Image: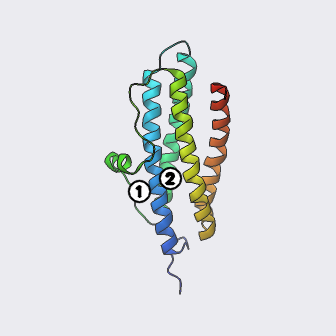
Amino acid sequence: MNDTNFIGIDSADAVELAEKLNDLLSNYQVYYQNIRGFHWNIKGEQFFQLHAKFEELYNLAAIAIDEIAERILTLDHIPLHSYSNYVKISEIRETTNITEGKECVEYIVNNVKTLVDKQKKILEIANEAGDEGTADLMTGYISAQEKLLWMLNAYLKK
C-alpha cells in the first residue's frame, strides 16, 4: 500500500516537493525584499515609471509567497518562516544601496531567471508525482514571468 498524504500525493514525493517549494519560497522572499529596496530607493528621470513598476512586482511576489507557503501546507509540510533561513537557503542574494534604474532592472531580470529555473524543476517533479495543484501553480508563475522577462529585456534593449 502506498503511503500518501491527505491529498493523495505519495509521501516521499510530498517531502521532495515541500523541500523544493521551501527553497523557492526562500528565493521569493529575498527577491521580494530586493524589489522593495529598489522601490524605496530608486532615483533619476525614470523614478515615477520604475517606482510604480517595482511596487507592482513586489505585490505580485507577496501573493506568490503566500501561495507557495500555503501549497507547502497543503502538501502537509511546514513552510520556512524565518528570514535567517531564507537568506541561508536562497540562491538570490540580498542587494543594497542600488538607486539607478537600469541596474535595478538588471538585478530583477537575473532574479526572475533564477525563479523561473527553480519553478521549471518543481513543475517537472510535480508532474512526475501527479501533483496537479503544484504543477498548475508553477505553470502560472512561469508563464507570467517569461512575459515579464521579455518586457524587462525590452526595457534594457537587449
Q: What element carries label 2?
A: helix
Q: Do the residues labelled 2 and 1 touch (CB within 8 Å)?
A: yes
Q: Work out whether residue 22 or residue 81 is closer to the camera in this orientation and state it.
A: 22
Position of the C terminus, as image quadrant, is: top right
In the shown orientation, is residue 108 left or right of residue 85?
A: right
Crowd tier of the residue under label 1, counting other residues whose Cα lies within 10 Å: few below 14, some 14–19, many 20 or above: many
Does residue 131 lie above or below 41 as drawn?
below
| Residue bearing the label numbered 1 | 79
User: Residue at horizontal 42%, vertical 40%?
Assistant: 93
Q: What element carries label 1?
A: loop
Residue 71: tell me if it is visible: yes
Which disc is residue 68 wearing? Answer: 2
In the shown orientation, is residue 55 left or right of residue 155?
A: left
Does residue 24 lie above or below 44 as drawn?
below
In the orientation shown, which residue stands out farthest toward the front? 158
Q: Quadrant of residue 52?
A: top right
Q: In which quarter of the image is residue 53?
A: top right
Does residue 44 lie above or below 108 as drawn?
above
Instruction: Name the kind of residue labelled 1 in the image.
Output: Pro
Instruction: Name the kind of residue labelled 2 in the image.
Output: Ile
The image position of residue 114, as x and y in percent, is 54, 45
Crowd tier of the residue under label 2, counting other residues whose Cα lies within 10 Å: few below 14, some 14–19, many 20 or above: many
The image position of residue 115, as x and y in percent, is 54, 46
Q: In which quarter of the image is residue 127?
A: bottom right
